[in-house]
Amino acid sequence: MPTELRNFLTLSYEELEDLNLHAKEQRKNRVPAHQIQEERIQYLADENRIKAVTVLFSDLEGRLHMLDYDKKFLIKSWDNLTFDGSSIRGFTAQRESDLRLALDWSAFYWGPADVFGSGKVLVFGEVIDKGGTRYSADIRGILKSFAEGLHKQEGYTLNAANEIEGFVFKGADAERTYHETGKFEYVNTGGYYHSLPGDPLRGFIDTCAEVQRAMGFQNEKDHPEVAPSQFEINYGYGEVVAAADQIQLYKLICRQVATHMGLTASFLPKPVVGVNGNGMHTNVSISKGGKNLFWDAKGQEKLSKLGWQFIDRILTHGNDLCLLLNASVNAYRRLDPHFEAPNQIKASATDRGSMIRVPIGNEKSMRVEVRSVAPDANPYMVLYSIFKTGLQGETSQIKNLRQAERYLPDNIYTALENFRKSKWTTKLLGDDVKGRYGDLKQASADRCPRLLGTFVKAPEVQFHHEVYNQFLWNVF
């Protein structure tokens, strides 16, 4: 169709970066919500070239959903946006299906027109139940309430940065067609840090990095990873809810860029056996008044007493949390000790097989790294469970807790059993949401071979929660 009659918003990458960094600074400085709301609504009213606002929210498993609202409609009806929750896996039953979307105006993004289309902006939404409160299965809202409560009561700011690995495979729909092809094809076999300029993997990484930079990610480094066709694009840390939002945007950007290139970006934890899988190492810290509370120049490994207590609580609940951090059948292929798998429930400054590592840091960068996290897990669930457990969980009396011979499950059935029996996961999620989440994971597990075996089975891809197929899920 001809486009010369359209006058939709298209900004340069430099202009996008300026806008997104300004919004990011407002969010970081906790500018009052009503002030940002007024500013955003006025901007939408004044900017005639915007045609639609894309509202993003995540379901219980972490799958990202997007609704486009006509801009003029949104300006009039932003406080009364409803949707059918019964269509979202893990949300309401059909008899109580109406839910509302409130807009988190601070989580507002301008995306490149050549990736997301012209004339659109993006904003994250919060799911609200009929009573007007945050919906219990919207883990983003639960995380936000938890973080805001800690800041108000203790002055704490929860910080996170995630190292998200993925693969790039040939073909634009490689995951959905895996049951037909039975294999994934690499676009590059160079390996760690090695990819020639201009090859498909390097081109993909460069393009994703450019988009992330334009969207205010504040990139740090990017490179091919250990396995063939594997990548990692690192960016700066942020406050916990913003950090989780960026995980969702990161995966969305990578998938969109790959599709434009006729490729597939995959965040399956172990799409190919015999090579390293995809992890999402999660680096966390807590600050107060600008001071990093995990730093102690005289502490063991320069980590403070609070930091070590945080670690001890996570180690105590390691098996309880495993299903939340490793949410799919395929994730348990990754917990393989032959490929630097972080499957040992212990802490170490050097051993990369440990669930938790204490990286080298200083008074600004000191952090705790939780390594046994898969990139297909719900990012809001991951960060909520890590921070709440690290601050409020129990501490086991196991002798030599930080180095004891204990291991994470090697299959989803054991992880499910641990999750369901755990009193701590009930405290984390409540009976209702815990039951819904367990049922979803059970449904996926029951459609896959019980024994993982030596090759990736079609059902563990076909029924994976991120390889979305509406028809398949509707027959559950």
Image (spheres, rainbow, N blue to C red):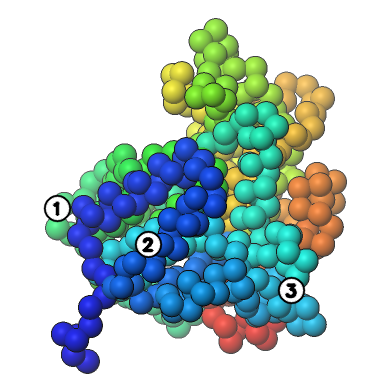
Circle 3 is placed at which residue position?
92
Label 3 sits on what residue type?
Thr
Q: In which quarter of the image is the N terminus?
A: bottom left
Looking at the rendering, in which quadrant would you find the C terminus?
Answer: bottom right
In the picture, the disc for residue 115 is none
Amino acid type assigned to the residue bearing label 1 in the image: Pro
Q: Mark 2 points at which residue?
A: 43
Q: Nearer the viewer, residue 420 or 334?
A: 420
- What is the x, y in percent for residue 456? 52, 66
Find disc 1 in the rendering and name its residue: 197
Name the residue nearer the viewer: 198 or 450: 198
The correct choice, above or below, for 305 with respect to 215 in the image is above
- Residue 2 location, x and y as percent? 18, 90
Residue 273 place in picture, x, y as percent: 47, 58
> Which quadrant holds residue 152?
top right
Q: Does residue 32 lie above or below 111 as drawn?
A: above
In three-dimensional space, the C-alpha distance between marks 1 and 3, rounded to whole angstroms, equals 49 Å
